Image: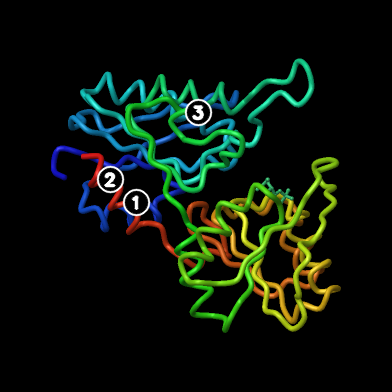
Amino acid sequence: MSDSILLYFGDEAALAGRIAKAAGMASAVVARHRFPDGEIKLSLPARLPARVVLLRSLNDPNEKIVEILLAARTARELGALKVELLAPYLAYMRQDVAFEPGEAVSQRIVGSLLASLFDALVTFDPHLHRVGRLDEVVPVSRAVALSGAPLLADLIAAKLENPLLIGPDSESRQWVATAAAARGFDSAVCTKVRHGDHEVSIELPPIDLNGRNVVLIDDVASTGRTLAHAARLLLARGAASVDVAVTHALFVGDALEVIAEAGVGQVWSTDCIAHPSNAVGIAPLLAEALRSLA
Ligand code: R5P
């Protein structure tokens, strides 16, 4: 891929290095300066090839959305004919309808902004619940949704004998089903009602949990309350152990403590978002996707 370059920001240098190596691509950092008033200035390599791939995982998304706006437009001014976004974590996907009159449907708005900036998008396990396909939300000519679930399934297979995969809510069914199918694991999903940022109620599926080694699987863990609540119920109903595997390790605030207090043993994640729980790498899958877009 000689006529292309992977651009990345300094805080994602490690992931960028793994992707560039796996894809055999040149890479360069986007320099970033923050002015005293909070504005940011970016500097890209002064000459760019025809194809630019910009890596930005959109956890803590608000400032990063400004960064990718500035970077994408500048890349085109500097000669890029095709600008692709590699966002292992795609933010603002959970607000997909107006639950109350007047609410912004962030998924649609952010999706159309991204489509106005990029020719293609590659991401992992985007939170598509009431929408079937990624390109319905981000209408670019090539929208690729990869999944961390088979990678997590491989890891779980190496760690546990005959695990039972449980999804904490109906939205997780797609990831649980993918992971279970990859390795022939038993699986089921719970029913969840969210009452607030930190409050959920969960009903377990009517299955025998006695003595089972359960792994809770989800696309994203944020406050950790969903996983903690599910773990408590599972252990109370006889599960021998509960571990956690997620694609996107947001784990904000005291999330990890709350999960540990609930009795969770191991916490595993992909490196879509850099986090101490990262246990599986996405670079090889991303490299393959980049080759298919070339
Ligand atoms: C929502 O449906 C997602 O799949 C996660 O279950 C949710 O975002 C987890 O949030 P929290 O960790 O704050 O409970």
> Disc 3 marks which residue?
137
- Compare marks 2 and 3 and give the one earlier in the sequence: 3
Tag 2 residue: 290
Quadrant into which the N terminus falls: top left
Residue 139 x/y as whole percent:
42, 25
- Three-letter residue code for mark 3: Val
Q: Is the C-beta separation of discs 2 and 1 under 8 Å?
A: yes
Q: Residues within 10 Å of mark 2 (few under 14, many from 20)?
A: many
Looking at the image, residue 72 lies above or below residue 203: above
Most foreground residue, 181 or 220: 181
Q: Residue at x 76, y 56 (%)?
A: 254
Q: Which quadrant holds the C terminus?
A: top left
The amino acid at mark 2 is Leu
Q: Nearer the viewer, residue 228 or 12?
A: 228
Q: Secondary structure at mark 1?
A: helix
In this view, the mark in front (1 or 3) = 3
Spatial CA span between label 1 and label 3: 20 Å
Residue 285 location (% of width, % of height): 34, 55
Crowd class of label 3 (few under 14; some 14 to 19; many from 20; radius 10 Å)? many
Query: Where 8 sits versus 246, above or below?
Result: above
Label disc, if present, on residue 286 of the rendered structure? 1
Q: Position of residue 132 (x, y in %)?
A: 51, 36
Which residue lies at the image location 61% right of the left edge and 53% below the top edge? 173
